Amino acid sequence: MAHFNLRGQSIGPIDGVLFDKDGTLSHSEPQLKSLADARIEEAKRQFSAQGASSADIGELEELLVRTYGRNREGVLPDGTLAVASRQHNILSTATVFAQMGLGWPKALLMAEDVFNCVDVQWQAKHPNGHPVSMLPAAFTMLRSLREAGVICAVISNDTTDGIQAFLRHHNLTEMFAAVWSADCWPCKPDPAAVHALCAQLNLSVDRCALIGDADTDLLMAKRAGIGAAIGYVAGWHRSPDLTAHDHLIHHWQDLTLEKPSGQP
């Protein structure tokens, strides 16, 4: 058990911390921006191949840009690309295709094909994976948690492979006792995901904190009865507009740990 201090003020004893990944631990925005652009271009290519007019292609691009939350500077932190799972992004893409006049079965098949084609292109371009940088001072916080005996886990809408690749790349694997991904059931933002992960770690939910950059994460945590729902807002070019947090941090340095008495 350790005590979290936010800018010098105690926010209570904590046995475990559940971390979101994208925008909380990882600086994912550059990668997501490239991914959005690749999916938009592939969708335009497939519609062009079916004889769509230039006006239709322009409308398709505009709809997808808004759907993904892609703007001039990068990606919106509360857009589907930043927050939602791959499957939910496929569904949102299919909805755009349906708005363009496709029947739902064809729209869904085309959305899946667009995503699969981009995956192949991405793998060819980045055969060893696309490295995503860590956010400043996150490693220092993780090391402090480990030294204090606090159990850490990742809860993310990324795939298990995607999470594990990020952890391996930054030599973080041993710092996390478990991973709860979009491949797990239930997945975020179901509060039962928090219960299941805490049960797996043999932790009481009310003795844990969840740190994330989206209200969906924070609401999920609070509905699950988490001890502290902590919003993190420094992971994007535009700070997320959070309302569901118990506490808010702008930099990892805002959060410090007070070790249990007797620990070195």
Image: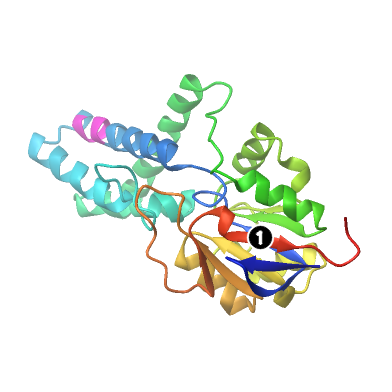
Q: Give the vertical position of 189 relative to 45 (above or below).
A: below
From the image, which quarter does the C terminus lie in? bottom right
Q: Nearer the viewer, residue 236 or 5?
A: 5
Q: Give the vertical position of 102 relative to 189 (above or below).
A: above
Residue 55 on image: x %, y %: 8, 39
Residue 144 on image: x %, y %: 73, 52
Q: Which residue is mark 1?
A: 256
From the viewer's perspective, is 255 left or right of 108? Answer: right
Q: Which residues are magenta?
A: 44-48
Residue 103 on image: x %, y %: 27, 52
Principal secondary structure, stretch drawn in magenta: helix
Residue 103 appears anywhere in the view? no
What amino acid is labelled 1 in the image? Thr
Question: Which residue is drawn at the image coordinates 25% and 53% (left, top)?
Answer: 98
Question: Which residue is drawn at the image coordinates 54% and 75% (left, top)?
Answer: 246
Neighbour tally class for label 1: few under 14, some 14-19, many 20 plus, Cα within 10 Å? some
SS state under label 1: strand
Instruction: Residue 160: name its quadrant.
Output: top right
Q: Nearer the viewer, residue 170 or 117?
A: 170
Question: Which residue is drawn at the image coordinates 58% and 22% (left, top)?
Answer: 128
Q: Assess whether residue 102 is covered by the magenta stretch.
A: no
